[in-house]
Amino acid sequence: MTVQEIGTPRRRVEDARLVTGRTRWTDNMQPPGTLYVAFLRSPMAHARINSVNVSAAKSRPNVVAVLTGADFADEQGSLPCAWPVTEDMKHPAHPPMAVDEVRYVGEPVACVVARDRYAAADALEAIDVDYEPLPAVVDMEEALKEGSPLVHEDLGTNKCYTWVFENGDLDAAMRDAPVVIERRYVQQRLIPTAMEPRAVLCVPEGDDFTVYSATQIPHILRLMLATVTGIPEHRLRVVAPDVGGGFGSKLQVYGEEVLCLLLARRLGRPVKWTESRSEGNMAVHHGRDQIQRLRLAADRDGRIRGLKVDLLADMGAYLMLVTPGIPLLGAFMFNGIYKMDAYSFTCTGVFTTKTPTDAYRGAGRPEATFAIERLMDELAAELGLDPIEVRRRNWIRHEEFPYETVAGLTYDSGHYEAATDKALQLFEYDKLRAEQADRRERRDPVQLGIGVSTYTEMCGLAPSRVLGSLSYGAGGWEHASVRVLPSGKVEVVTGSSAHGQGHETAWAQIAADRLGVPFEDVKVLHGDTAVSPKGMDTYGSRSLAVGGVALYGACDKVIDKARKVAAHLLEADENDLEFSGGRFHVKGVAEQGRTLQEVAAAAFAAHDLPEGLEPSLDAEVTYDPDNFSFPHGTHLCAAEVDTETGMVRLRTYVAVDDVGKVVNPLIVEGQVHGGLAQGIAQALYEEAVYDAEGNLTTTTMADYLVPSAADLPEFTTDRTETPATSNPLGVKGVGEAGTIASTPAVVNAIVDALRPYGVRDVPMPCTPERVWRALQGDGAPEGGPQPGAAGGLGSVQGGDAQ
Amino acid sequence: MTRVRVEVDGVTYEDDVEPRLLLVHYLRDRLGKVGTPIGCDTTNCGACTVLLDGVSVKSCSVLAVQADGRQVTTVEGLGIDGTLHPLQRAFHEEHALQCGFCTPGMIMAALDLLRENAAPSDEEIREGLEGNLCRCTGYQNIVRAVRRAAREMRTPAQEREVTS
Amino acid sequence: MIPAAFDYARPTTVEEACAALADAGEDAKVLAGGQSLMPLLRLRLAYPDALIDLDRVEALREIRDEGDALFIGAMATHHQVMRDPLVREHAPLIAKATATVADPAVRHRGTFGGALAHADPAGDLPAVALALDAEFAAVSAERGERRMPAAEFFVDWMTSALEPDEILVGVRVPKLGAGWGVHYEKFHRTAQAWAIVGVACAVRRGQDGVEEARVALTNMGPTPVRATEVERSLQGRAASEDAFKEAAQRAAEGTSPPGDLHGSSEYRAHLARVLTARALTAAAAG
């Protein structure tokens, strides 16, 4: 009997602890003697630090230490940026704690270490910092102008880099093009908002240190902490215990992680820091924040000739782990699923006095997908074509795969026709178009719009040689090992570090399926550098497409070894053995066999192994993919827009995704749902807002609007399955698909609803006021937001206090 | 310091606390009841939702002294004796959690919802959970889970009616 | 985030509460349900020396029938108010608006009196109290009880007419008799978010059309405001959608709406007009 685990909607094994509260969040751990850290953060966007007076804070009860940037200056080093995208990229020093100058609101300037959180919080208020204000640099376009104040005076410019990619003759494509669409889109700044705020616990043990952190990247963090602090790598153990979501925000080496480690070393006691949400909104890296200038040339029949992309990408005040590279991940995606003759991409990274940006779910690819999918709708409108039709005329046809794109990638597989047909059917496209026509006819104050998004993304980051060619500082491989224990139970160790994705279930399914053992007999270990010897961690929808494939290979290796042992035990030629259902048997003689468990026991005892074979039944694989994987899909959104108030209500949302072979459909569906919610939130709700002085005005969840269940629609999700040809599992990755696809689908729907009114764009997030203003034919209100007015921090929640 | 006596998940605790100590910090730091996490400062996220004398509250906006003489139920107090509460089971069955950080609060809020409305519509479920934010699931499976648990929790009651 | 230290008193009667407040001095705060005050304390945007916690003053939770009016105790929770049979029958506008406040857990703790005393113009209940001509009862240890109309209670942004030594003990809400329809129209970006604009209205229809209309606006100025021009222009008019729309054109007159992240003042003025028409129409239909 063959065990069919891959493809089964297994309920997750992780849930047992999560639904009962028996969790291991970093903040849950409290070793004896733990001290609590609190950080004082800059209230100024840009200022010179004249002095920091900590004497009053030090004398407060229960305070163990109060330290400033100057105290750390000799040991704190500079936070790493692993992606120097050009040779002449400006790379400013980034001390974990500011010493002379602060460059964004929220930058740490001092810290208190105390017996408990309350004492630490109190002592922060007794620290006196003398700031000399310097001019804030808030607007990217202004920042690049001659004479702009500088974020880093010593660099002499606010320009971090310019990175260019060109393919084909763009001049020829643009010249005499019958249709040219030019647009300027803004990808607003977002705050990732993982539900678990960051937390770090550092425990010193002699010369060794264990760092528990709410991180996505224990392995990378370990190496980087060693590099920054000089503590030898082998003296550091990094553990990512239960981690409450990341979405890129925990793909980082944060100053607080470095500083807590230094404090543990200095004080010789465990130290813990747990972030508050309002602190995190300022200090967790932000995402997106691009200005996109786009020029698309097409023929009258809708065929795209060429695309020119000119980006400004806000780096924020400093370069963090992969800050400069994020927009470049989009460089390969602006062409989307379409064929074109020429393409040019230029990205200029700009320093501003704002929180640094870095990876947020999708990381560069949502921005690119938004641009091309919005442009396709604009092209359709310009030509009077249906937006689906204009896409059909341009997309790579199923029979054309593998296909080398104008951006230089080779898409191995895809079936855009199938996904689109299925989506149209589920959506009842024609019926909704008819309703739209009717509402237009009746001049209904509530108009209906239909938004299309046919996306692809490069994920499964990544072939190491490609990363190398892009100047990324590391490889993109992943490690897995499989050990069959003497009792026949199986332990899987993965270098991929889960924080909600369900590795403990999906990896067990892969191992159970390959090894033919019961699902319950497999345990997956991860997230601890002492347990998982090497890894490249979890981001970029890479876990399954790289880490899962590594596991697949390790299972095969185990089977190969077991086959040798089984053949020896059965006194048969290994080529005569068949392996199915977890048992080896001689072909044609089913009763003559050995189970994997029996083989494991024999390999453990090692009394009688074939010559040259090592005892124990285990294997490991470090897998480096040859190519990225390319999930794709078609998303359709119907939005009702109240033309009197500007309020948008999503009525129908259909997502048909092709993520290749599916290991666990339940997990895949969940990933799509969550991705949709975040992508929709970018379209409608979320924005990190800075005022002209560089103050972040969305520091709490009362102002940074994360949608609730009551704000989101029911989604209809389905799949087509076109296996990836680039890996033996046929998997592609699903973590970011929903986020990448949904933002343009929603905005396209809104604009579609309002086209009869002459509207051709609504800036994100499409707030009721912005929709209303688009209908009035004008732009942003004069003067922008007025901090401190009602609805800000004064008005927190619920109305109730005397 | 104020002396408080609080019953948490069936156990009575007596402690001297500062008046400003938040109930959630009392649970986590003093009692080691870390099943209830903290997700924000402004009562928006609902991760810290517990029942206080049987009704849902956000334990980050209640003082420990206010729980004096009262009963607190956290997610750790559900499904005693190793059996999961129907809501816990339904969250598992319907894949209503990913990272799981919002889950304790979400389950406690759902419990409160079902206490008042044993057969909520999807819309009522969504509105009933409007004070609990999740960043992973898009809520769809949470709605399914609550619907499923509601069904399960209603069934025994009906059976009782039939037999009585 | 963590509140700064404070002294704490937990009275069980109004008298004890007033005495505790008088003793605590100017920098004391009264803690009702705490659903706005606790976040402000945690963010250290408020630093009271002492909190007088009304949580155990059971007498203040009462909602009673006073003949031609209801008296709603200040510590009646939102949850209690929106389900109370007296409120639902005689002050349905309060029940409807309260159901839109925050979320269920917050409504379990948050109180009617607390929400009013907080005097946040973005809160839903101040405009409702204003529309209903509610009367506010405050008590101090020194001067005993005094009453003031809603129009005098809301003084400025987050500022009520309560003296530092006074406690709001309850609100007298005149019953609406037969013929009244009510509606609270709340416009917000997400379910949890504050009203960008809200419209509380009550319309009494007679045979000849509108006999009386009351319209009060949420978040259209530093205090809740009555749209008096709308009310006046509707008197005696037919209760038609067109009439409501026409009258609603004057909804923003005399207001000074704030501009913030969620809406500019110009947009709020526009919303006030649109939402007032909708609220009137819904109220008249109800």
Image (tube, rainbow, N blue to C red):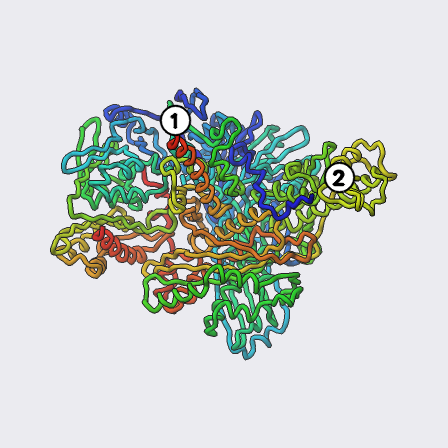
Residue at 42% of width from left, 64% of height from top? A431
- Give percent across and percent down for residue A725: 68, 58
Left or right: A17 with respect to C174? right
Q: Which mark is residue A765?
A: none
* Nearer to us in this view, A445 or A55: A445
Q: Quadrant of residue A325?
A: bottom right
In front: label 1 or label 2: 2
The residue type indicated by label 1 comes to: Ala
Percent x, y for residue A318? 56, 50
**Residue at the (71%, 51%) spot, across then down:** A624
- A72 w.r.t. C5: above or below: below
Label 2 Cα crowd, 10 Å radius (few <14 / some 14-19 / many 20+): many
Please tell me whether mark 2 sits on a helix, a strand or a loop: strand
- Is disc 1 placed on a helix, strand or loop? helix
The chain under label 1 reads B
Up/down of A549 relative to A397, above or below: above
Which residue is rendered at x = 42% and y = 67% of the image?
A760
Q: Position of residue A711 (x, y in %)?
A: 41, 50
Label 1, label 2: how many angstroms apart (C-alpha)?
54 Å
Callout 1 crowding tier (Cα within 10 Å): few <14, some 14–19, many ≥20: many
Q: Are marks 1 and 2 on the same chain?
A: no
**Quadrant that contains the C terminus of chain B:** top left
Instruction: Look at the image and tell me in which quarter the N terminus of chain B lies.
Output: top left
Residue C240 visible? The answer is yes
Toward the viewer: A754 or A308? A754
Which residue is depicted at the point 41% across and 25% down? Answer: B18
Circle 2 residue: A618
Residue picked out by circle 1: B67
